[in-house]
Amino acid sequence: MAELRTEEEQLEAIKRWWKENGTSLIAGVVIAAAGVLGWNAWQDYQASQAEAASMRYQQLINLASQDELEAADRSRALELIDEIVGEHDDTLYADLAGLIEARLAVSDGDLAAAQAALGDVIEVSSRDYIQSLARLRLARLQLADGDPDAALATLDEEISSSLAAQRAEIRGDAYVALERDEDAREAYQQAKALASENDQPLYGIQLKLDDLGTPEATL
C-alpha cells in the first residue's frame, strides 16, 4: 500500500506540475521550432539573394565588357546597376557595380557622373580596398577634369597600403600638372620603389621620370 500511495503521489505531482508548467513548456517548444524554421528560411532567403546578385552581376559584366556598347545594351547595363545597388546594397557586387557605372560614364564623356558614382562607392562601401580603388580612380578623373589640387586632396584620404605605389604615381601626375617637377620626381621615385618592394608591375613610371629630365644641380 505504501508503494501504491507513493506512485499515486508521484502521478499526482506530475499532473500538478504539468498543469502549472505544461502551457509554458509547449510554448517554449513551439517558439524553439519557429526559431529553427525562421533561421532556415532566413538562410534560404540569403542564399537566393546572393544567387540573384551574382546572376545580375554576371549579366552586367557580359554587357560592360563589350568593345562598343549599343544604346539598348547600355540602358540594360544601367538597369542592372540600379537593381544590384538597390536590392543588394551591402554586397561586394554593389560596390563593383558602382565602379562599372563610373567606367560607363567615362566612356560617355560624362566625368561629373563618373565622379559622382565613385563618390557613392567611397561613401557606401564598407570594404577598405574598394574604397581605396575608388579614391584612386576619382583622383585620376579629377586630374582629367583639370583639378590637380582636388586630386591631391583625394589622395590624402586613407588608401590601402597595397595600392601605395599607384597612389604615389598619381600624386606625381598631379604635381606635374601643377608644374612642381621636384615633388613629381620624388613621388615617381617613391612609386617605383614601392612597386619594386611589393613586386607590383608599374608600367611607364620610368618614362615619366625621364620626361622630367635630370634634376637641376644646386649650388
Image: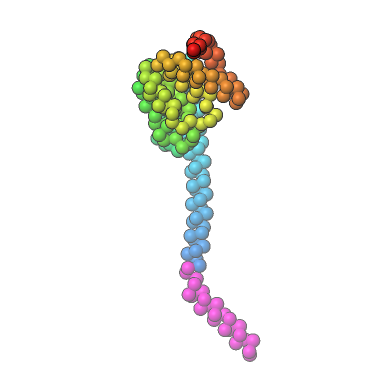
Q: Toward the viewer: 64 or 29?
A: 64
Q: Quadrant of the N terminus?
A: bottom right
Identify whether 57 is placed above or below 66. below
Residue 36 seen in the figure: yes
Identify whether 97 is placed above or below 29. above
Q: Residue at x 37, y 19 (%)?
A: 147
- Colour mode of the rendering: rainbow
| 118 in the magenta segment | no
| 11 in the magenta segment | yes
Q: Residue at x 61, y 85 (%)?
A: 6
Magenta highlight range: 1-24
In this rendering, position of residue 194 left or right of residue 116? right
Q: Toward the viewer: 180 or 80?
A: 180
**Residue at the bottom extreme, as displayed:** 1
Q: Residue at x 58, y 84 (%)?
A: 8
Q: Main secondary structure of the magenta part?
A: helix
Identify whether 8 is placed above or below 143. below
User: Residue 77 falls in which quadrant of the image?
Assistant: top left
Q: Residue at x 48, y 75 (%)?
A: 19
Q: From the top left corner, tell me how far across and down residue 12 is, in percent.
A: 54, 81
Q: From the top left corner, tell me how far across and down residue 71 is, in percent.
A: 39, 18
Residue 83 seen in the figure: no
Q: Toward the viewer: 212 or 130?
A: 212
For the image shown, how many numbered marks are present on the structure? 0
Q: From the top left corner, tell me how far across and down residue 41 is, in percent.
A: 49, 48
